[in-house]
Image (spheres, grey):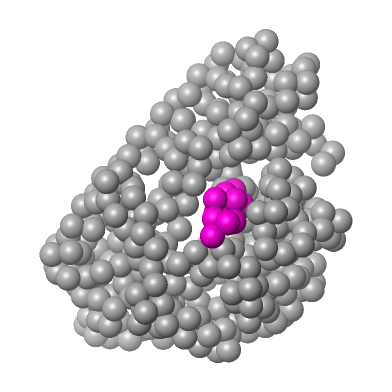
Amino acid sequence: MNNPANPLFLELIRSAIWNRKADENLFNDVNESVWKEIIVFAESQSVSALIYDGILTLPKSVWPDKKTVYKLFLQTEIIEKRNQKFIDELKSISAEYSKINCQFILLKGQGNGSLYPNPSHRSPGDIDLYLYRKDDYLKANRWAVSNGFKLEDENIHHQGFEYHDIHIENHKNICFFGIKKYDRLIEEKIKDIIQKNMFEKIDLDGLRVKILPVELNAFYIFYHLFHHFIHLGIGMRQLCDWTLFMKTYSADINSKIFNELVDSFDLTYAMKSFASFTVKYLGAKPEYFPFETDINNKYVDIILEDVFSGGNFGYDLFKKRTFHSELHRKWYSFRFSTKRIVKIADLAPEHIKPLPFIKLNTNLRLLVNTIKNNIRSV
């Protein structure tokens, strides 16, 4: 970490997620250019409110200038209001889906937010709803159209729409591996959970919502960040989400069931690498994880470098580039992911080495679906 802003950024994140004071000795004589880097990076990582929380634990004598602190205050206020808006609209869409007898499981998002010391300071993204009963996915999408909401083109496992300025994603699958072995396996796991009604429930401002059972949820939250990592990159928010989930539910996770689940998807080494990253750089305790961690794992620093270079979900890679078309953008993404394989293939070879084929196959399937939908609409 040659950039002086990086360790300071990490210390402020640790302060926020563990609800402790930041080490003030690290912030003596920090100049405004370094503070500017920290703030810009926080914005790119969607963790501005967490950085603000960390700064508030420091003596005012080492704070950045008043203008910077006020900017963070305003950003945090917006995030707080946005979080309340998300909860309000989650209540609203839940009531609407209840009217048409559509049941869902809440994925990620607001459920993860509840794990933070201050839930309203996790920057929200969208609302992901898994419609797990037969025909409910299509029923929910038809409801959206009939009520004047414009559906986006269907993804391989979800379809989204804007609902009162909040992005809703209706999921027909919780995730997509693009490898038949793993897609069949996750389908079997979900089917078993549905049949046995093994869902957990959490309370979000008085709304009781279903979430995945703890072992599968821990795996799913990890796979979500891993999926983004192998394609383009991940952000600090996703790493904080998983770290806090493992900390919160460490006593509830059945180690044998969980480790067998992870191993069945050939992701044990990858998960241990990310867990080791959280121990070394996010201050997680090794006992939060039902397996051994190793901070000397070669991928720990690669993950850190990736976070600082790519921004949230790797989106910083696209910021300074101009694309002539959506196809041009996808081609750049494909080339970037393919080159990336050489660097990270050993992390999970069963998932990473087939990645070029998976991306091509997925995009061809989406193209065919788009053509079919266009023909139907004529």
Q: Position of residue 100 (x, y in %)?
A: 14, 69
* Quadrant in which residue 27 is drawn: top right
With 33 as the anchor, is 357 left or right in this view? left
User: In this view of the protein, which residue sits in the foreground, 301 or 250?
Assistant: 250
Quadrant including the N terminus: top right
Instruction: Decide whether residue 247 is among the magenta residues.
Output: yes
Can you name the residue that lies furthest to the top here? 61
Q: Position of residue 119 (x, y in %)?
A: 44, 40
Where does the magenta region start and end?
Answer: 239-252
In this view, 365 is above or below 278: below
Residue drawn where x is 49% and y is 46% of the image: 115
With 56 as the anchor, is 212 left or right in this view? left
Quadrant including the C terminus: bottom left
Instruction: Decide whether residue 325 is among the magenta residues.
Output: no
* Quadrant in which residue 30 is drawn: top right
In this view, 56 is above or below 309: above
Q: Position of residue 163 (x, y in %)?
A: 26, 54
Is residue 51 something that shows in the picture? no
In this view, 3 is above or below 58: below
Q: Position of residue 248 (x, y in %)?
A: 54, 50
Residue drawn where x is 60% and y is 71% of the image: 258
In this view, 142 is above or below 5: below
User: In this view of the protein, which residue sits in the foreground, 34 or 125?
Assistant: 125
Residue drawn where x is 55% and y is 89% of the image: 180
With 169 as the anchor, is 20 left or right in this view? right
Residue drawn where x is 59% and y is 74% of the image: 257
Is residue 62 something that shows in the picture? yes
